[in-house]
Image (cartoon, rainbow, N blue to C red):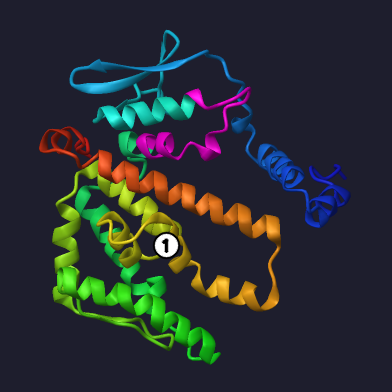
Amino acid sequence: MAAPLVSQKFLTSCLKSKNISHVFECVKSVRNLHNPRDNLKKFYRQATIATSDGWYEINLDKRKLRTPHGNIFRVPSEPLALAVATEWNSQDKVINRHNMHLTSLCNTALENPFHRTREQLTETIIHFLETDTICYRLTEPPELEKMEREQWDPILQWAADRYGLEITPTCSIAPPIVSDESKEIIRRHLLSYSDWALFGYHFAVDSIKSLLIIMALVDKHIGVETAVDLARLEQYFQTSRWGSVEWHHDVELYELRCRLSAAALFIHWCSESSTIKQKAALAPV
């Protein structure tokens, strides 16, 4: 029998360690074992941007950056291009694709791997309402029920005031009540974004399983830290009572903040002007 890729002794040392730097090394080592593509050594000195046919490309020294399928990597706005170049310039000796969220989002928007139309992508996002984090409530223990009511209800009220949405949360396995009119309002709102921005929306909603929180985030009603805290409310309640695995929950928290920050910026930079919206459109399927 082949030896395991990660020994029990190694895992035990990771779990018992209180040294955060050691923990990050453990996490990095495990990721590298399961994601050999992430082991690509840095082969360039500097990432820069260049314009071509109204789009913005990334050059790694004199090489054009390409997507995983070999297409020219290009983005519809200069701020997004500069941010992607910064991601590549921030890499050290090894290119850590796992943390390059903007690059990943651009690749998804460029290649549209599931060949979704903007209408299909919009319906996929709206579908998250049926399982939206803040629409499922617990009645026990009373302290948690109070926290959910005090912190989640203001988001529902904001959605009602801002967009006229009628959503009733549920305390059972039955889905929340969302009127057809509310779904249509959300549908029209999402379709006002460019196709690229919709990919960012989907990425953000999928990260925290809440469309309503992301709508508040994109509208700048709340910030990234608040959005993450709202999405992790039940987990926060449990860890405050029973304790947490310090390094595990810290890594998870900061990873989620990074993902949401990238998504929010991506949506903004892909929705800045009508010119960008026109360019940031899906190719015909």
Q: Position of residue 282 (x, y in %)?
A: 22, 38
Which residue corresponds to the image point at 86% horizontal and 43% vertical from the top-left?
3
Residue 140 seen by the camera: no
Which residue corresponds to the image point at 18% horizontal and 21% vertical from the top-left?
54
> Quick one: 209 or 143, which is closer to the camera?
143
Label 1 neighbour load within 10 Å: few <14, some 14-19, many 20+: some
The quadrant of the rendering that contains the N terminus is top right
Location of residue 37 (image quadrant): top right
Q: Position of residue 254 (x, y in %)?
A: 55, 51
Which residue corresponds to the image point at 34% horizontal and 73% vertical from the top-left?
130
User: Is residue 63 on the magenta stretch?
Assistant: no
Q: Residue furthest left?
A: 274
Which residue corresponds to the image point at 19% horizontal and 44% vertical from the top-left?
194
Q: Amino acid at mark 1?
A: Thr
Badge 1 element: helix
Q: Position of residue 159 (x, y in %)?
A: 23, 71
Residue 31 seen by the camera: yes
Q: Which residues are magenta?
A: 89-107
In the image: residue 212, left or right of residue 255: left
Residue at which label 1 appears: 226
